Image: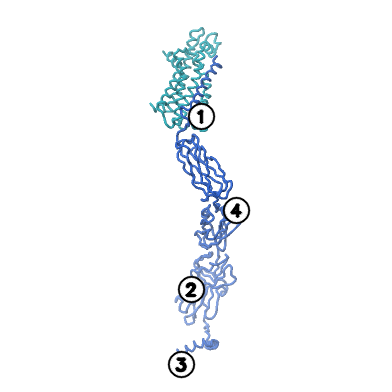
Chain colours: A blue, B cyan
Amino acid sequence: MDLDSMIGNMEKWKQDDPAKFERLKNLLHIPFVPPKEYKTPTVLIWYPPAKGEITRNEKLDIYAYVKNDNPMEVRSDLYLALEMKGPDDQEYARIGGQRIILANQYDEKTNATLRDWSGITPFSDSQEVGNATFRIWFNDMHSTYFTDTMYARPFQQDDYYSVLELDLVNSPPEVDEESIRVIPLRARYNDPIRYEARFFDTDGDMINVILHILDDQDREIRNLTQTVTPGTNVTFIASQYGLFGEEDAGKNFSYFYSFDDGLDGNRTGINLGPRLIPSPKIYVSDPQAVPADENRYWWENYRFSLQVKNPEMNSLQIDLYTSTQSHPNRYQYTRVINASEEAQNVLFEIAPFDVSDAGHSFSYYFRYSATDQNSRESTDTISGGAINPKIVKYPIYSTVTIANVLAVLLAALIGGIVIERRFYR
Amino acid sequence: MTSLFLNGVFGVSLFLLLLAGGVALHLLNMERTYRRVAATSKVKVDDEGEPKANGGKISKDKLKEEIMEEMFTRQGSNFNAAAVAAWMLLFAAFAYFYFLTPEIFPRHNYFQVSFLASGPLGFAAFGLLVLLFSLVAAAFVPRKIYGYYELSKSMKVAVMFAVPLLAVSIFLSVQQGTIYPEVDLGSRSFAFLALFASEAALLWPVYADALGGMK
């Protein structure tokens, strides 16, 4: 039987009868017996940052320092593993992979070598802060050792440790108060309302953000959660979550955020918004202002009108306001109309100006006691044009003007006569 | 020339200057007359006008009062009534000319009181208000002035003629108001001339006496 046939048979036996194969293996096994002069290698943790506090996302660079003073022919392979007991752990657990040092991999002069576990983040899922302990497990083919128990007393010199203890700390997340907003603050229920805010975490932890939506009694009606990267905007779009429905039109809401990084949390104050615009009750159109006289004198009547379709509201109040330089936002008159299926032409036939408005332009708007199709309770301000600069209504030859002048002249003459009789005699 | 009629600061200053000049000259005229009368009477006065007679028992004010009483000449009733009316109308015409329309003083005029100016009786109310304010001055100025001057017939005619002249000025100023923002320069100028001619006529006796005194 040549060697190839034997290997082939061995593989076949291993598959066909694993129990017998295992027995054969034990029979053929010759245990390694260390020579009398064999010395257990020295294994220590080398932690060059020498920094006692770490955060969950901080990357750790931990090394195993191994010194094997045995001569080459006595050395055996060395298997190493890094173990950690976190703040919330009862037992040590391995982190990172196993490392192997072959007999010929030591420095010829110092008989030492290093194995590293670089860039590991063993606490990324930790739910507690506190002490974390590291040790190295190793096996030199003779025995298994743990660096925390193999020495008579804990060793620590410079950056070398038999047991490494680190303090896991955490900075709570923070919110940028200026960034908290709801856009738009006043909106229709089906508008793309967005809640926005920006959160930070100096440790770089992911942040769980919960948006709490409150009704006008400050009772929580919904909450939504997002996990965000620190420093980025968190955005909740109301329509995506179906936050508001038609029945919410006209209501005022408020909100606040609670947020945490898994370890520490906080919450914002209550912010107002959104204020949902009531659903339209009326439809308005065609606002007009027509002067009674084409000369547009201040003393003339003006005919203001507005087309209003008001199918459901009784006693709908419509106010007319005018604005001039002398009288900004001057209330003029109110009309009240009742519900009707037909569009109604609401008329205001009034003389809205006085002499101080002469020569100025005017504008006007209507205000109403219901929400219109634009979700507003007033029309835009509409320019009405210029008012004629003439200031006196009556011509010089009119009875009124002549009577005015005569009244003054007569008063002076009568005054002269009365004073002469009373004081000059 | 037109801009002169429409220059508010010039017009008001001129009006007040003529009035102030009249008051000052009247006081000088009275003082000069007192000295002349005192010089020709038994009562001697020193350089300061203090009487020396009766051992100095009579005061200057008392003496002056007595002399002025002696000098006072009653003018006719018609003249006095016309003079009082003319002085009242002088202030009214002045107010109508400068403070009726926004043309001369855009920020200080009758139309700033919109509730008054917007009504049909606004012009009358404005004029009557001015008459009321000028009542005290207009009532006593003629008595305090014209009673101490020897008024020629032409002077009396001039003072009495001021009444219709001022009525014309008021009427033309009101006409300016009714056509504002247009301006009728002809009537504006005439109203201005009528106003200041009337003021000159009313103060003529004082100025004339002062001129005579200087001679």
**Callout 1 crowding tier (Cα within 10 Å): few <14, some 14–19, many ≥20:** many
Identify which amino acid the numbered label 2 is placed on. Answer: Arg
Q: Secondary structure at mark 1?
A: helix
Residue behind mark 4: A216
**What whole-number distance in Å separates the C-alpha atoms at marks 1 and 2?**
107 Å
Q: Secondary structure at mark 2?
A: strand
Closer mark to the observer between disc 3 and disc 2: 3
Residue behind mark 1: B122
**What whole-number distance in Å separates the C-alpha atoms at marks 3 and 4?**
92 Å
Closer mark to the observer between disc 3 and disc 1: 1
Identify which amino acid the numbered label 1 is placed on. Answer: Gly
Q: Chain of mark 4?
A: A
Using the rendered image of the protein, determine whether residue A64 is visible from the camera's viewpoint. yes
In this rendering, the answer to whether A357 lies above or below B84 is below
Q: Which mark is residue A1?
A: 3
Depth check: give the residue in front, A337 or A329.
Answer: A337
Closer mark to the observer between disc 3 and disc 4: 4
Q: Quadrant of residue B168?
A: top left
Depth check: give the residue in front, B39 or A277.
Answer: A277
Q: Quadrant of residue A148?
A: bottom right
In this rendering, the answer to whether A325 lies above or below B37 is below
Q: Which mark is residue A115?
A: 2
Depth check: give the residue in front, A11 or B26.
Answer: B26
**What whole-number distance in Å separates the C-alpha atoms at marks 3 and 2?**
44 Å
Asked if badge 1 and badge 2 are on a common chain, one would say no
